[in-house]
Image (cartoon, rainbow, N blue to C red):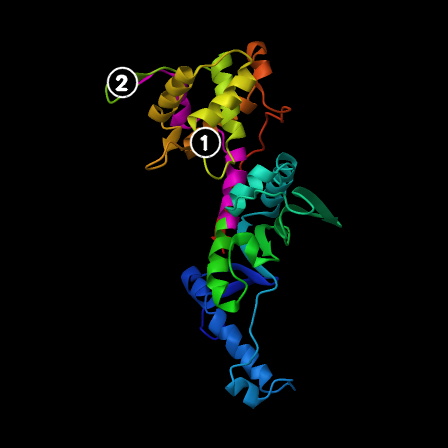
């Protein structure tokens, strides 16, 4: 950046701000497989090696593989007090982020056999600094405050196979892209948990009868046992990588409702959810996924104050219903 004549503010081992974010990203992107290969070749020419020039001429030489790759995203706040308040609330509300279904969604990988050591969330403390670690196979995503004013999410890949990428250096760009997707999905998971505000038009569509293309979609009335069981089942399906079907969702609803729940009722509820824009069907399949509005409505209905009639429809122990204030952040850098 200095050689390119681009002004910036340093932040420990990163950047706090710059007048040319695009130029900064372009310079960072120059660190690729070819650059690393040239670096290695330069040292191979200096260090004593067991392989000779004749070995190389015969096709035998060193190969470069990736042992550990870290890709981070940093969000710089306008003031340290905003960053501190945000991060402390985030840690308290995401102690269960390392559950298998959530981590499989965040990493975009389905695991049929639980990995050795399982899934877990760990809070590590050093002085007054806390790091939230969510583990997936050999890798993890860690979230922490950087220098007291920046929120950093960092995907640490200790085995490229965790993201379905080969280990050789030529796959670095693919691995970096997938690791950035992990960071983005982690941010989305944090945002969904904190972003269930009543200002969204999705709540009005859900809570009132609507008319879509001449067809009437009944309201999803808060407190109705069937509705509460439905949104409880949707919360259980929030982190299913492959989506859900009529059959799989109906099993969840039946369990939470505690009374017979027919296939026809499930079909009607799916139609109601689809017309209100809360779910969408994947092309050429009978599989559905929640939309962003569907996630917010499901979480708000499910985690909001529950009436007595719907108390039995909760799928797990209640979490706090109050959410921390939202603090503005001035800049985003990756």
Looking at the picture, does residue 279 appear above or below residue 204? below
Q: Determine which of the numbered discs, if any, sits on residue 215 in the image.
A: 2
Q: Label 1 belongs to which residue?
A: 244
Q: Based on the displayed image, in which of its 4 quarters is residue 60 positioned?
A: bottom right
Residue 197: image location, x then y, percent: 48, 28
Asked whether, in this view, residue 93 is left or right of residue 203, the answer is right
Residue shown at 57% from the left, 61% from the top: 14
Instruction: State the residue lying farthest toward the right.
Output: 127
Q: Based on the displayed image, in which of its 4 quarters is residue 279 positioned?
A: top left
Asked whether, in this view, residue 112 is left or right of residue 294, the answer is right
> In the image shown, does 102 or 149 lie closer to the viewer?
102
Residue 167: image location, x then y, percent: 55, 63
Asked whether, in this view, residue 267 is left or right of residue 119, the answer is left
Q: Residues within 10 Å of mark 2 (few under 14, many from 20)?
A: few
Q: Nearer the viewer, mark 2 or mark 1?
A: 1
Residue shown at 60% from the left, 63% from the top: 13
Instruction: State the residue lying farthest toward the left.
Output: 214
| Numbered disc 1: secondary structure | loop
197 is within the stretch colored magenta: yes
Asked if residue 1 shows in the view, the reply is: no
**Among the two numbered marks 2 and 1 on one chain, the one whose residue lies closer to the N terminus:** 2
Residue 303: image location, x then y, percent: 56, 24
Give the dominant element type of the magenta stretch: helix, strand or loop. helix
Q: Which residues are magenta?
A: 182-210
> In the image shown, does 26 or 266 lie closer to the viewer?
266
Tell whether label 1 touches label 2 (CB within 8 Å).
no
Asked if residue 147 shows in the view, the reply is: yes
Residue shown at 60% from the left, 39% from the top: 100
Residue 195: image location, x then y, percent: 50, 33
């Amino acid at each position: 950046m200095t050689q390119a004549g681009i002004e910036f503010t340093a932040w420990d081992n990163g950047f706090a701000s710059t007048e040319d974010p695009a130029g900064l990203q372009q310079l960072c992107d120059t660190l690729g497989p070819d650059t690393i290969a040239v670096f290695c070749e330069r040292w191979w020419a200096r260090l004593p090696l067991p392989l000779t020039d004749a070995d190389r001429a015969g096709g035998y030489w060193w190969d470069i593989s990736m042992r550990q790759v870290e890709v981070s995203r940093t969000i710089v706040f306008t003031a340290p007090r905003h960053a501190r308040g945000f991060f402390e609330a985030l840690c308290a509300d995401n102690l269960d982020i390392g559950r298998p279904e959530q981590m499989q969604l965040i990493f975009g990988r389905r695991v049929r056999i639980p990995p050795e050591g399982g899934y877990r969330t760990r809070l590590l403390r050093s002085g007054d600094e806390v790091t939230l670690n969510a583990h997936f196979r050999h890798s993890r995503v860690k979230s922490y405050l950087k220098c007291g004013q920046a929120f950093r999410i960092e995907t640490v890949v200790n085995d490229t196979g965790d993201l379905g990428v080969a280990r050789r250096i030529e796959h670095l760009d693919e691995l970096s892209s997938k690791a950035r997707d992990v960071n983005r999905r982690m941010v989305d998971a944090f945002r969904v948990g904190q972003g269930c505000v009543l200002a969204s038009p999705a709540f009005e569509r859900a809570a009132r009868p609507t008319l879509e293309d001449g067809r009437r979609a009944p309201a999803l009335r808060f407190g109705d046992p069937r509705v509460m069981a439905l949104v409880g089942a949707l919360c259980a399906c929030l982190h299913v990588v492959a989506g859900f079907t009529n059959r799989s969702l109906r099993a969840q609803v039946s369990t939470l409702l505690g009374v017979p729940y027919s296939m026809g009722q499930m079909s009607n509820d799916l139609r109601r959810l689809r017309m209100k824009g809360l779910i969408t069907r994947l092309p050429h399949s009978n599989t559905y996924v929640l939309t962003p509005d569907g996630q917010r409505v499901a979480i708000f209905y499910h985690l909001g104050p529950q009436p007595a009639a719907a108390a039995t429809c909760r799928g797990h122990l209640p979490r706090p219903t109050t959410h921390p204030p939202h603090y503005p952040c001035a800049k985003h850098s990756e």
